[in-house]
Amino acid sequence: MNFLRSPYARVLTAALFLQGGVFYALAMRTEKTPPMAPLAAFPFSLPGFRMVRDIPTPPEILNILKADDTLTREYASQSGIPVLFYIAFFNSQRYGQAPHSPKNCLPGEGWEPVESSTIEVPVAGWPAPILINHFVVQHGDDKEVTLYWYQSHNRIIAHEFAAKFWLVVDSIRYNRSDSSLVRVIVRVREDDVDGATRTGVGFVQAMFPALVRQLPQ
């Protein structure tokens, strides 16, 4: 009860009411999301990487995600290291659709978090290094490095709360609530987390220019 009377609780409650009011007011307006080519059109070949296979998303998973388009592919580096690449695109978040954080999904699948941080990655065509999540998980003897972020028009967002904040701002300023979750997974070999991270970062740098062209600006 003391928490409910605290200034933090009042601010949080006001923010939730504000977000609800904004979305209710904007629900009467048609969103202005630019057209986008299907994610299946994403390049099969990237600098230093080639596509190995497309992985269909099961219908039951699609029903849970409620994404407007998804892409799951396995690529391989020139040395044969596999990289799992995933995009979930949401044309609108006004009616309950929203990206699912890997920090919630992976533990639900039996993966235990080992390390969670953010890293900066310099990428071509972007004015500054992008800040993305670096998430290490383990399942028995298996370990994986997951790099992920949320991407809206001309914006790369690492943190979930920041993504919610910019969702409200973009809804007000641009009448848009489209967003994408971008995720890269690399299996850790011989407990070499740094090596798996370097492979993942290399893939991010290779695919990022194509990703910017693919997603709505």
Image: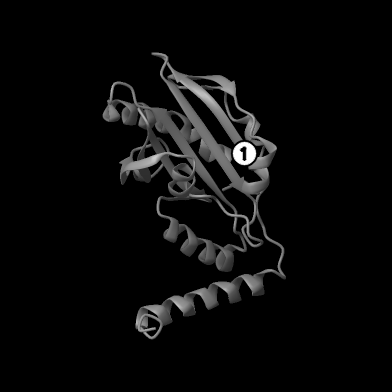
Q: Residue at x 67, y 41 (%)?
A: 60
Q: Position of residue 185 (x, y in %)?
A: 43, 32
In the rendered image of this protein, does residue 9 appear above or below residue 70?
below
Q: Residue furthest top?
A: 79
> Which residue is painted at 33% across and 22% down in the image?
189
Instruction: Say how many tags the image has.
Output: 1
The image quadrant of residue 173 is bottom right
* Protein image colouring: one colour
Neighbours of disc 1 within 10 Å: few (<14), some (14-19), many (20+): many
The relative height of residue 38 versus residue 77 in the rendered view (above or below) is below
Residue 185 visible, this angle: yes
Query: Label 1 is placed on what type of residue?
Result: Thr
Residue 132's spot in the image, x, y percent? 38, 45
Residue 67: in sight, yes or no? Answer: no
> Tag 1, which secondary structure?
strand
Query: Which residue lies most toward the bottom here?
Result: 5
Q: In the rendered view of the protein, which quadrant contains the N terminus?
A: bottom left
Q: Residue at x 27, y 30 (%)?
A: 194
What's the residue at 47%, 38% (across, down)? 183
Residue 94 appears in which quarter of the rendering?
Answer: bottom right
**Depth check, front residue: 181 or 111:** 111
The image shows residue 41 at horizontal and vertical percentages of 64, 30
Task: From the image, tell me which residue sits under label 1.
Answer: 70
Q: In the image, 35: left or right of 131?
A: right
Counting from the top left corner in percent of width and height, residue 145 is at 37, 34
